[in-house]
Amino acid sequence: MKLIIQIPCYNEAETLEVALNDLPKHIDGIDEIEYLIINDGSKDNTVDVARKWGVQNIVSFKQNQGLAKGFIAGLDGCLRSGADIIVNTDADDQYKGEDIEKIVRPILDGEADIVIGARPIDDTEHFSFVKKKLQHFGSWIVRKASSTTIPDAPSGFRAFSREAAMKLNVVNDYTYTLETIVQAGREKIPMTSVPIRTNAELRPSRLFKSIWGYVKKSMITILRAYVLYKPLKAFSLLCLPFLTVGMAIGVRFLWFMAHGTSGGHVQSLILGCTLIIIGFLIFVIGVMADTLAANRRILQDVQFHVKSMEYMRRAGGNQFEI
């Protein structure tokens, strides 16, 4: 059983060694542990620090691509290097390396294919009151969208089985954390969560410039993921207000017509018909989107089998440049 721990990096030369030193060298049930960094177009000597420390695998972007693309490229690099289990953690040493054993244990025991570390958000001192509440609210929205019970959706500390890693896709450019939960929930990939600990903050988060910017991007990501994986339900909910109001106006017009007073209400009839047509068109778009989603699931299944064949031959100590 081979575990590869991947770390997305962008100009992390100052903190990377601290994070690497905190990683485990042995875990019961794991025969081999390797490490991989995703160099997301770093301008400093992040790669040199990783090589000097002894990182076996390096995936490099020529220019910064963002966390989401870096995460997927890292999964690909880990799979190419023969990983049976992949753990994703941060280069700023936010998470306790000792807890990697906790998040891989459900996979080793066959209880789950994805395990997400739940941080003690309310007890994290460098989280502001507003950030704590927004973290809880965002996780609640993700739970509703994904039909899961994951308490800490934004957590980047997570483990994946080989099979789960081959099934995941990320289409947004912002972050992988929310979309992968929605995808896994909707695709019914076995997923669970375990409580983990965090370290003191080494540097401020680079993922967002402000709380409200983070909220806006997160809500867009969640909504997009929900529409992507449940299009018919999403568009049906969207068309209901138009159909309801349009039909109510139509019934009102019929009532006036039955009493012989419909002459002055032709404008409302036009409005009602327009709303009904708009609602119907939205529903038709939902049906078309649902058909596309069915085709996407077929393509994902084909992609999974192609990846299975592609990664069948294992190779270690690789460097990839994208």
Image (tube, rainbow, N blue to C red):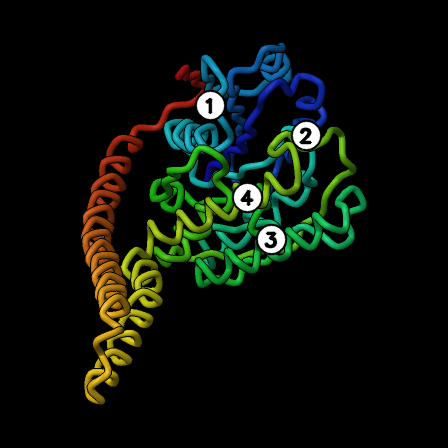
Disc 3/disc 1 C-alpha distance (Å): 25 Å
Near-viewer residue (267 or 289): 267
The label nearer to you, 3 versus 1, is 1
Tell me, for residue 92, which label it has, or none: 2
The residue that label 4 is drawn on is 216
Tell which tag, 1 or 2, sits nearer the viewer: 1
Amino acid type of the residue that numbered disc 1 sits on in the rendered structure: Gln
Question: Is residue 9 left or right of 145 when viewed as pictured?
Answer: right
Q: Nearer the viewer, residue 188 or 291?
A: 291
Amino acid type shown at disc 2: Asp
Answer left or right for 167 relative to 220. Answer: left
Q: Residues within 10 Å of mark 1 (few under 14, many from 20)?
A: some
**Image spot of residue 118 (x, y percent):** 63, 52
Q: Amino acid at mark 3?
A: Asp
Q: Nearer the viewer, residue 114 or 179?
A: 179
Secondary structure of residue under mark 3? loop
Q: Which mark is residue 152?
A: 3
